[in-house]
Image (cartoon, rainbow, N blue to C red):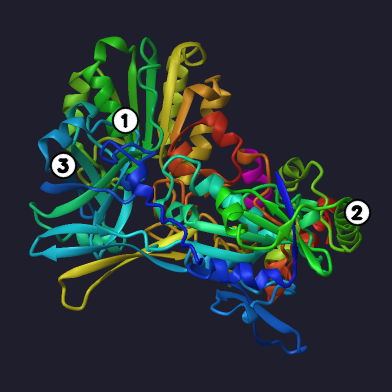
Amino acid sequence: MREKLPFIDVLRQTRGGGRRPHDQSGFEYSYQAEITNVYPLTATEKLYQIQIVDPEQRRRFTFKPGQFVMLEVPGIGEAPFSISSSPVRHGDIELCIRKVGTLTGFLDRVERGTPVGISGPFGTSFPVEAMQGQNIMLIAGGLGIVPLRAPIFSVLENRSRYGNVDIIYGARQPSELLFTYQYEMWRKFDISLDITVDQADSAWQGHVGLITAILEERIAAAGADLARDTFAIVCGPPVMFKFVCKMLTAAGLPMQKMFVSLERRMHCGRGKCCRCNIGSTYTCLEGPVFDYWTVMNLKEAI
Amino acid sequence: MLFRILDKTELARLFEELAGNRIIGPVSRGSDRQGAPIYSFEVVYDFAELRLDYTTTRMPAKRFFLPYRETLCSFAVHGRAWGKIVDFNIYQPQILFGLHPCDINALNKLDKVLMQSVYPTPYYSSKRRNMFIIGLDCMPQPFCFCRSMGTDTALHGFDMFLTDLGDRYFVEIQSAAAFNYLKNITAREPTEADHVRYREVAAEKNSKFTAQVDTTDLTKILDMEFQSEVWQHWGGRCLSCGTCANVCPTCYCYGVEETVDLDLRGAVKTKHLYSCNVVDFAEVAGGHNFRPDSHSRLKYRYYHKHRGFVEAFEESLCVGCGRCGEACLARINVPEVIASVRKGEV
């Protein structure tokens, strides 16, 4: 008889264009996008304005502050990047990228107009809506300001709904400071912005020293408010997390009101490649934004 | 559940019935230094090639559903513009003939993370949905600890399951497709005598386990012993070669690389299975490595298999097949590592 088994096409079981997470055809789907502008920020970082080409797709693309996309250039590579623009801009996103590896080294050399692939958005976000009515403390070290820019925009656009907003930002040198052109605007929107550098240059007139020194002042100024009605968002190098989170916890900030964004290697962004695992928690699915309670329960997270 | 009894001579006829499809099964591929046969899962064209008496295969059948290298997509590049061509690399159903319970359970575990989670991976599920599995019961080898992991029997995840009763097979049927294939085969209802014989065989199997792993409270113990010095010991022996992941039926982690065609008119995105023991597994661009030491990588491997997966799915990701311990050049094996962690000393 030698009857053949029927062949099952897994794609035939999916409907609806393949954009939803459970659609199998969506797994390898990427939006056609274009780098519309490149803005050099420092010697190594550039801000890329990237637009999803199809207007309808662009409009439907929504994300929450703290989420990331996978950016792909055929033959060069694919990597995760935190979205640095305001969520109200939908599929007109901005990514701040440091020239550091194969893909980013390539991106450093491209001109505007270069087509790229974008998939996502992926991961968890900062709960900016739950933070309404409260004070917010945003603490960033180095490149850590990049994932914080989306929540900063969210707060700016809904400024009346938040109490005091403090940004504390540290970099190694003044030349490494990112988004310098926006500081004036942030301040005018009634955001307190403290900047510190490890090493000053001749032109630098601001703070010199560790971020924790400023944080101490801020904690003292906040007093009992910190334990009662403050949320904190922290992002920076691993060593910074340790000190800052410990200080805030010691000052009484509840662990579930402190959020961090973690960096890990990722090859898929979809909870499959395991490269971003902390224990067996996928940073791409259950992160990159975690509350500090969760982080404390993950081995070797920070 | 339907049970049938099949004379051993009838199995060749069943193979013939199935032979219109691609059949993969255990065959002997030479012998090792001790003269013992090396078994391997291969595409089989002749029933005589099948070695249903196989002990275990060095490599799992993984390459037929999670290929070691797989093209995720190719790109057609026209000037600056480009398009993506996606292919799931499966064009016909595959019959896996003679999988032991550990390997069937491995598939069931992989299903949970690759098919039943968010972002199901179509490369895996397309192969999985086109799979017809004939399971085969086995006798434990000295390195098998499937009993400890609860994977010495397969409850589901197969179409047909054979237990050797000597001159006949006890057949468990779990799919309509399997039932249909038996239509032209002489099979009979089991009698009480068959049941008695089945229980004898099961009891014999039970009595033969030697290796074991105590999994009582293991998730908690692994957490408590996170800083234990035993990890340094095992890490000191580990060669970070990744062989354990290579031979593991449930290791699915991977890396992706992209290459440009020589004519610059296309590019290919390739996935290759990886190992968390390899040094750059958790290294990010810029050079920071989240697990720079071999002991932290080895420990991570055990945490993922025996703690994290348990936390997520209430079962271990290890099926106790013992392949990693057999293949490890540094003779690191799961029963010894877990026992040492439990004791707090090597």
Q: Is residue B13 left or right of residue B281?
A: right
Pair 1/2: label in front: 2
The mark that comes first in sequence, 3 or 1, is 3
Label 2 residue SS: helix
Is A96 above or below relative to B204?
Answer: above
Residue drawn at the location 48% of the way across and 13% of the way down: A223
| Quarter of the image where the C terminus of chain B is located | bottom right
Q: Give the chain of mark 1.
A: A
Residue type, label 1: Pro
Q: Is residue A160 left or right of residue B168?
A: left
Task: Please tell me whether residue B308 belongs to the stretch shown in magenta.
Answer: yes
- The picture places residue A195, in percent across and down from the top left corner, at 31, 34
Q: Are marks 3 and 1 on the same chain?
A: yes
- Judging by the rendered image, the residue that carries numbered circle 3 is A52
Q: Is residue A246 visible?
A: no
Pick the front one: B149 or B101: B101
Pick the front one: B259 or B284: B259
Residue type, label 3: Ile
Residue type, label 2: Val
Is B83 above or below relative to B11?
Answer: above
- The picture places residue A22, in percent across and down from the top left corner, at 39, 39
Pick the front one: A238 or B314: B314
Label 3 residue SS: strand
Task: Please tell me whether residue A47 belongs to the stretch shown in magenta.
Answer: no
Is A67 above or below relative to A165?
Answer: below
Pair 3/1: label in front: 3
Q: What number is the disc on residue A65?
A: 1
Residue drawn at the location 37% of the way across and 9% of the way down: A133
